[in-house]
């Protein structure tokens, strides 16, 4: 891997170039106007940059909603490295800050600090670090509270609604859904000084709570798209009727089990109902959290284990992916272990449980299949299981639950 030029994560961010600002607005405003975006601002009157803007993360349209929410101000955005592929010059010049996902990154802290202190700017952060898998909030890092307390700048939370429903990560075909966002000043500088890190983290987590399917149902938003359930089995991988894993399939507005053939329908309000027999879960996130419970039980019983041959690609810089070949990935209570050896490359990467509070996964990424990505400070590996299908959601849940267990043991 040393032969590859690495992305320069030390390069300081800049304020957005003035000639790119109209382009950013042009790319953002038609989409949010079409979806009748309403931004509800609480405690924001008189607040000017610099401040930290913590945003929920649902879909690509998040960036357009954020652009409208802070208008006419601009921000430095923390962006994952894959966002820089083939467009590093553009993202650098709109002020983006690069990040490799789910890594402990002192460099990122320095870049954020530079953004608020030297550039006197808003710094927008998406701390969930991935799009929501099932329309609910994800685990947040404990370091978040410590970071904002040290920075001593106001903290604002942008909690968005409708974005996930517009383009869920398991089905990227766009749907029309009206959008709303709550933009709330959570802390001013004085409040931060008087709050503990634990108190700050808890307040941020409460402000980050969302449930897109409940929001859809409460607001009676109809999604009539004929493929509204297509690929949702990527997330809902375990049958609640027969308990079999990785036997679910979905298409159109239906999801069913290939083992016991129990079939469910998703209605226009996002509710689930069995065609015949028992409906175990009418609320989709309840199904997902039940899967989490099953994974947790396997971990506690020491029966959780994943192993498969994998295809590995690397993303050392913004030029694009490099295919490294075939390797082996295992995951269990001791963490991840990725190995690959051939004539050109050698990898022996271990990621301990406490080094990752979450895991970034993709569904049918670049039409290559489902994948897990693991990062170090200088490399990101995109890992595609070869033999086992529809497994990445379970791995993601296992990472979170193993982290919680290990953290309690400290």
Image: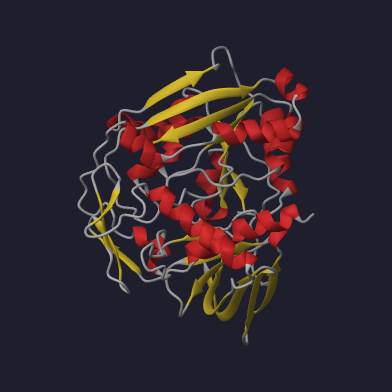
In front: 260, or 167? 260
| Percent x, y of residue 310 | 53, 77
Residue found 68% across the figure and 61% down from its top: 376
Looking at the image, residue 392 lies above or below residue 14: below
Residue found 73% across the figure and 18% down from its top: 190
Residue found 69% across the figure and 25% down from its top: 153
Looking at the image, residue 320 lies above or below residue 280: below
Q: Is residue 30 left or right of residue 288?
A: left
Q: Is residue 92 left or right of residue 195?
A: left
| Percent x, y of residue 55 | 53, 36
Q: Quadrant of the N terminus?
A: bottom right
Look at the image and tell me whether residue 15 can be seen: no
| Percent x, y of residue 367 | 37, 67
Q: Name the quadrant containing residue 120.
A: top right
Q: How is the image coloured?
A: secondary structure
| Percent x, y of residue 79 | 55, 46
Residue farthest along the top direction in this orientation = 46
Q: Is residue 384 left or right of residue 261?
A: right
Residue farthest along the right direction in this orientation = 410
Residue found 68% across the figure and 39% down from its top: 144
In front: 247, or 69? 247
Looking at the image, residue 293 lies above or below residue 384: above
């Amino acid at each position: 891997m040393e032969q590859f030029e690495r992305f320069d994560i030390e390069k300081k961010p800049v304020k957005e170039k003035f000639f790119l600002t109209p382009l950013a607005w042009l790319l953002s405003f038609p989409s949010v106007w079409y979806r009748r975006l309403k931004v509800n601002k609480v405690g924001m009157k008189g607040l000017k940059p610099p401040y930290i803007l913590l945003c929920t993360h649902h879909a690509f349209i998040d960036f357009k909603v954020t652009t409208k929410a802070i208008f006419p101000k601009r921000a430095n955005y923390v962006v994952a490295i894959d966002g820089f592929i083939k467009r590093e010059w553009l993202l650098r010049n709109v002020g983006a800050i690069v990040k490799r996902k789910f890594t402990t990154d002192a460099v990122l802290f320095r870049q954020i600090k530079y953004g608020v202190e030297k550039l006197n700017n808003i710094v927008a952060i998406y701390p969930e670090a991935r799009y929501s898998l099932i329309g609910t909030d994800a685990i947040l890092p404990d370091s978040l509270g410590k970071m904002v307390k040290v920075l001593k700048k106001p903290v604002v939370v942008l909690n968005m609604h409708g974005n996930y429903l517009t383009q869920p990560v398991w089905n990227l075909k766009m749907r029309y859904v009206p959008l709303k966002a709550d933009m709330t000043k959570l802390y001013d500088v004085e409040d931060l000084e008087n709050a503990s890190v634990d108190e700050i983290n808890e307040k941020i987590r409460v402000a980050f709570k969302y449930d897109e399917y409940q929001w859809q149902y409460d607001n009676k938003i109809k999604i009539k798209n004929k493929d509204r359930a297509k690929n949702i089995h990527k997330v809902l991988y375990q049958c609640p009727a027969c308990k079999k894993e990785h036997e679910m399939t979905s298409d159109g507005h239906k999801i069913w089990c290939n083992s016991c053939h129990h079939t469910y329908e998703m209605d226009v309000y996002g509710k689930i109902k069995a065609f015949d027999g028992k409906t175990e879960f009418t609320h989709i996130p309840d199904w997902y959290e039940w899967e989490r419970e099953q994974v947790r039980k396997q971990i506690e019983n020491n029966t959780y284990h994943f192993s498969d041959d994998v295809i590995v690609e690397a993303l050392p810089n913004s030029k694009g992916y490099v295919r490294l070949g075939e390797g082996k990935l295992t995951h269990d209570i001791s963490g991840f272990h990725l190995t690959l050896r051939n004539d050109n490359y050698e990898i022996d990467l271990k990621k301990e449980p406490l080094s990752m509070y979450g895991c970034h996964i993709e569904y049918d990424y670049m039409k290559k299949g489902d994948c897990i990505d693991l990062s170090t400070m200088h490399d990101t590996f995109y890992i595609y299981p070869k033999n086992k299908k529809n497994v990445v959601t379970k791995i993601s849940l296992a990472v979170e639950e193993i982290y919680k267990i290990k953290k309690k043991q400290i």
